[in-house]
Image (tube, grey):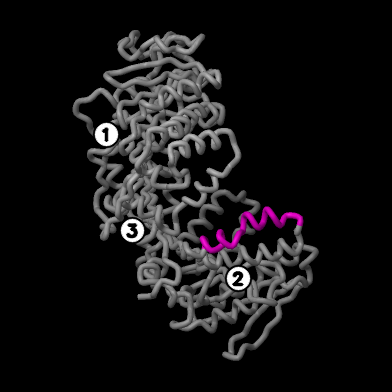
Amino acid sequence: MRRYRLFTYLLTTLLMLTFSACGGCSKEEAPKKAVVKEEKVSLDGSLVELIPDNSFAFLYWQGGHPAYKKLLNSPWSSGGEFAELMKKNTPQVKQFVSMIKALGLDPEDQEIWTRLFSEAVFFAAPGIPVAEAPAEQADDSLASPGASPGASPVASPGAAEPAGSPDNVVPALGVVFKSEGVEFGKAIGSLEDQLKAEGREFEKITHKGASGLRVSTGEVAGPRDFYFLCEGPRAVISSQLEAAQRVFDGGETKLPEIVVSEKFDKATKGMPGNAIRFVTGYADLKILTELSKDMAVVDSQGLAGLQSEDFAFRSVAIGLAMDETPETSVRLLLNPNSPGAEFFTVSGETLAAAAAKAKPASRGLNAVPKKPLSFVSLNGQLLKNVKKLLASKVPPEKAAELQKLAFLDSIQQLSISTRIAQGGVSFFPVPDVLLLMETEAVDSVAEQIEILAKEMSAASPSTAGMQWTEKQLEGGQTLKSLVSPMGFGLFLVKSKGLLIAASTEAQATAALAVTEKNGFASSLTTRSRNLVSEADRVSTFYIDFSEVASLLKKVKGLMAMYAPQNKNEVDALLSAESLENYRKMGALVGSLDKNEEVLSIDTFYQKPAEKVS
């Protein structure tokens, strides 16, 4: 939101200026062995203990974590993008680059960032209601000397304001961070000069040995000020003075209430272990929903009448990790009382429980040709729930149309695969699409799809009059096709317990020719194969970035032929180096699971050309 631009400005400006204190960066070796999974997420002793106790959301990042340093030296690092950013010809970047180069530092050295921002936690907490705030503040937090010309004294959070104001309650936003051997205080003078040059209103403040600035946002709605305090290698920027002061109060600290809650334990169970996880995030959506009722921005969107029970999720958690390859975990704690919870439940059972009773879904996977661009599987029960959801939204007069999707009730598993079209099949670089429907009612499903496809083609003048044709294949199967004059169409062929639908004949026949040793499944590692083939997954997905690079190379060639005027832009975007970086990433493998009250999304990378075990 625009009202919080100054928060971002202060943080980024401070980081740039603080490089003047950063020198002699040393590298550390990555750990030889890491623990992959741990039962409980531990944040004891971290900066998370310094955020407000009533925080409803936080994102904790460990730039100095060995796992993050390992990521920086891997093919999945974003260091290339940072290096490109440093080449941008903007005043801010120029100032930043000249400053650190003058110190003999390399702006492209990623290790500088890990030392400068070795640990940080962003947080959001309910603000202090104006009508309830204390009338006075201890004046040891303010120091008028050094105020910029025309600056007003630091406003007390309890300053007079109508209790019914839209800003009666404004969330406290902030970030607490520290570095390895960097003194943030040395950047205050430079920060003051920068603020003066830009005409921003600010004033010096102190608190128990920490010093910093109060900077006015100039906003009518939202936070009036942001407070920056620092001492040694530790600093804080917050829209609430009390939250900033708390970082330097000293004494015993403890984790906020949301971290020690039962909901947090449920939402983070099964996350990547502490030894490999460098980012941990969590938000209590119920608290956020209740808080939103007091915010004018929500009223303007017409959402003030919503209740927390209306939302399908109670909280969300995220974890980023680096083991042999990067891993990501997202957990959504379901609200069993919300209308949306029904989407993930069937007859009182979870999708995973229902799927576990079904026949293992492997026929579709074993029919996918080698080297797909992408692969997605959808549990049959999920398809039924989607159909049920559509039925609840369709007007009575349109109910008959929905009956055309009745075949979805017979599908146990739907697998969708794409691959780069073979030469001569398609002039355009459009991937072939393959749908694999596992069902015990192959004939019935095929018949319903044929009728639906014929009706859809008749509705368009360009495809009206198209007719189904048949072709006998060498294996004795019958290939049915409905093809447009442009060569696009639908190809259907039946196999035992499997209906194959493809956008090209080559893709359909390739699926029939797949064996246990030459298909997609044979190229997967044990971990990847187990994930995409297990029956209790709601959904799985796979993207091969080597194939993505090959597709982009074809696009580049086509652009060079038909849009030569854009050659420079295309070459910069799809350079040989960029395409090679894609190939080095290997394949992204992920799953969507439902376990009790938690919906889980997990991803990891399979190394390129990794030996199959």
Question: Which label's residue is closer to the chain start, 1 or 2?
Answer: 1
SS under mark 2: loop
Around disc 2, counting alpha carbons within 10 Å, would you say few (fewer than 14), some (14 to 19), or many (20 or more)? many
Q: Which residue is mark 1?
A: 49
Q: How far, Cα to Cα, is label 3 from label 1?
A: 26 Å
**Under tag 3, what secondary structure?**
loop
On residue 420, which mark appears? 2
Q: CA distance from mark 1 to mark 2?
A: 51 Å
Q: Position of residue 440 (x, y in %)?
A: 48, 76
Q: Quadrant of residue 446?
A: bottom right
In this rendering, would 339 be left or right of 556? Answer: left
Q: Work out whether mark 3 precedes mark 1 in sequence or the reverse, and give the earlier one.
A: 1
Q: Residues within 10 Å of mark 3 (few under 14, many from 20)?
A: many
Q: Where 235 falls versus 459 (above or below)?
A: above
> Comparing marks 3 and 2, which lies closer to the viewer?
3
Which residue type does callout 2 highlight?
Ile
Name the side, left or right, on which 441 lies relative to 605.
Answer: right
Marks 1,2: beta carbons within 8 A: no
Q: Label 3: which residue?
A: 323
Q: Which residues are magenta?
A: 565-582
Q: Residue at x 62, y 68 (%)?
A: 431
Looking at the picture, tell me which residue is in the foreground, 380 or 100.
Answer: 100
Q: Mark 3 belongs to which amino acid?
A: Asp
